[in-house]
Image: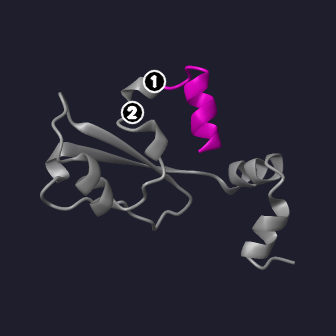
Amino acid sequence: MAIIRILLENGLLKFTEEDLINPNDMQLRNGKKFSDRYLGLRYPQKVKIFYVHDSHYEKFILPKTTKQKAEVFHVITAPEIEILHIIDQDRHKIFLQKFQCH
C-alpha cells in the first residue's frame, strides 16, 4: 500500500487516484466481496483490477456473473520491497512476532 501511495502521489502510474473506484478501499482482497461491492455499478469501460500480492499461488477470483465487467492483473511483489517497508515503518519487531522468526 505504501508503494502504491508513493507512486500515485508522484504521478508515476498511468492512472491517478481520481481514476480509482474507491481509493480508501484498496485492500479488499476477496473477489466475490469486491464484485458485490463495486461491479454491480455501471462503468464506461471494463474495470481493471490490479491485485498486488506476494504469492505466485494466490488468486483473485471474480464470480462468473461479473467476470465480463473486469480484468484482473496480478502484480507480485518482491520480498525485498516488503521488508524495506517493514523496516521503514519500524514494524520489524511486529513482523518477527507475527511470523515467529528468531
Magenta residues span: 1-14
The percent position of residue 49, horizontal first and vertical second, equals 35, 44
What kind of element bears circle 1?
A: loop
Q: What residue appears at the point 63 percent right and 39 percent down from the top-left corner? A: 3
The percent position of residue 39, horizontal first and vertical second, equals 22, 47
Q: Amino acid at mark 2?
A: Leu
Horizontal side of residue 74 vs 90, given as left or right: left
Indicate the quadrant containing the N terminus: top left, top right, bottom left or bottom right.
Answer: top right
Q: What residue appears at the point 31 percent right and 60 percent down from the top-left corner? A: 33
Q: Is residue 15 visible?
A: no
Q: Is residue 22 magenta?
A: no
Q: Name the colour scheme.
A: one colour
Q: Of residues 26 and 87, which is closer to you in this image?
A: 26
Q: Give residue 44's quadrant in the image.
A: top left
Q: What residue appears at the point 18 percent right and 41 percent down from the top-left corner? A: 41
**Is the residue under label 1 in contact with that under label 2 (CB below 8 Å)?**
yes
Q: Which residue lies under the disc numbered 1?
A: 16
Residue at far left of view: 65
The percent position of residue 38, horizontal first and vertical second, equals 26, 46
Q: Badge 2: few (under 14), some or many (20 or more) residues near its Cα, within 10 Å? A: some
Q: Give residue 97's quadrant in the image.
A: bottom right
Q: Which residue lies under the disc numbered 2?
A: 20
Q: Which mark is residue 43?
A: none
Q: Is residue 13 magenta?
A: yes
Q: What residue appears at the point 20 percent right and 62 percent down from the top-left corner? A: 63
